[in-house]
Amino acid sequence: MKVQPAKYLKGEVKIPGDKSITHRAIIFSSLSDGKCNIENMGLGQDNISTINVFRNMGVRINRVKDKCVVDGVGIHGLKEPINILDAGNSGTTIRIVSGILSAQSFFSVITGDKYLVKRPMKRIVEPLSMMGAYIIGREKNSFPPLAILGNSKLKGINYNLTVASAQVKSSILMAGMYADSETTISEPVKSRDHTERIMKYLNIPIKVEGTTVKIDPVNKIPSFNLKVPGDISSASFFIVAGTLLKDSMITIKNVSLNETRTGIIDVLLSMGANIKLENVREECGEPVGDIIVKGVEYLKPFEIRGEIIPRLIDEIPILSIAGAFADGISIIDDAHELRVKESDRIKSMLEGLKILGVKVEELPAGMIIHGTRNFKSGKVNTFGDHRIAMSFFVFGLCSNLGVELDDVSSVKISFPDFFNRMESLINA
Ligand code: S3P
């Protein structure tokens, strides 16, 4: 794909439902005691993978565009899948669903695409095995496929996560619902809390104290209706493009403003971006609002490390694009987790930025970016990673030379309509 430079972005845009919240809405509705309605759900392939996994365990899910009716089968109502469950590209699906499979009285195997089979699973296999699950995976239980012989008598555990991971936390929380006693999970730094929030919304007995979460055994999950707020990770490509193209003025409606996800806004504001939040309210247990972005002439560089990293982990690719346009040197550190996402996102971003004339340095857990406006034109490898593809698309809009991208089909993983919605705002 050849991306042409844009003059500015103007108008209003609606962003599809949040991918993380959609996964959880499908999971909890499938395990609920009746009919659930989900509105404004995410339509990316990752969310479809979660739907298919539950369909293959006997759950009736009827989706029409972004609305979905789920006939929950109850917490003990899943059926043994007759074939291998396919999580596609979705780390969230395989990790959270494995927590549920660990507690079933049947056998299952779950795997995914060529990228997912390289992603680390020991982080879930270890705690779930401590609870009494029988899980076997490739390379000494490190990678998918995972074969799971469920155990309906899981024990509650007290577990300290070594990395802040919402997927791991949620996987243990799911298993914890089926355990015989309380389960306690502590994280080094708080990761996104959508599982805790949907559990509270459904009156599931969960206690959150700082970075520790406790869950008691659960007998049933009530049916519910839920409207998914827009995905701030998808919105971030519009926020950065609107900031970098100085004559822009855009409104992004109904976006999730959950504090565990809004690190990108804090960093862009510290760089001098013009971003305002309006209409902030709570819907179905999650904060939501509109984001108004105006373009600016200059941006200051940023330094991010430590506690903020989990609050913007998925936005680091697009933030590194903002860093490339900033006046000075930006630093990203303590982001080891980027190495094990859909691609090694440190390597993927560094390679592309170098091709486009940006001076960058690799750190073990991050990178240093020397901001410039002297870009080169070039063809960038997106490594089959949706967020890398959308980040370099934004680079192409904002640099005076555009960019060529090798393959943008990965964008369907989180945001199939990305190009159309961007197109609707672009003034060339
Ligand atoms: C997610 C959690 C994050 C994030 C991923 C979605 C979730 O991963 O990067 O895109 O929905 O729980 P980790 O939990 O591994 O940090």
Image (spheres, grey):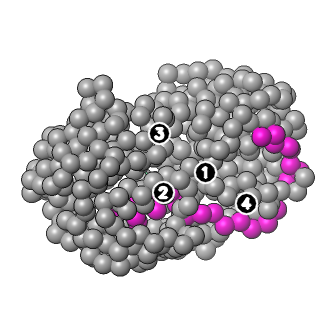
Residue 390 in percent (x, y) is at 67, 45
Mark 3 beta carbon near ligand 1 (under 8 Å): no
Instruction: Check the picture and name the quadrant holding the N terminus.
Output: top right
In primary-sequence order, the first of circles 2 and 3 is 2
Residue 161 in percent (x, y) is at 28, 40
Q: Indicate which disc residue 47 carries.
A: 2
Judge whether 153 appears above or below 257 on screen. above
In primary-sequence order, the first of circles 2 and 1 is 2
Q: Is residue 364 magenta?
A: no
State left or right for residue 367 relative to residue 212: right
- List the residue tagged with mark 3: 113
In primary-sequence order, the first of circles 1 and 3 is 3
Q: Amino acid at mark 3?
A: Asp
In primary-sequence order, the first of circles 3 and 4 is 3
In primary-sequence order, the first of circles 1 and 4 is 1
Residue visible at 31% across and 64% down in the picture: 58
- List the residue tagged with mark 1: 412
Q: CA distance from mark 3 to mark 4?
A: 27 Å
Q: Nearer the viewer, mark 1 or mark 4?
A: 1
Dot 4 alpha-carbon crowd within 10 angstroms: few under 14, some 14 to 19, many 20 or more: some
Q: CA distance from mark 2 to mark 1?
A: 11 Å
Q: Amino acid at mark 4?
A: Arg
In primary-sequence order, the first of circles 4 and 2 is 2
Say which element carries label 1: helix
Residue visible at 38% across and 55% down in the picture: 53
Q: Which residues are magenta?
A: 1-28
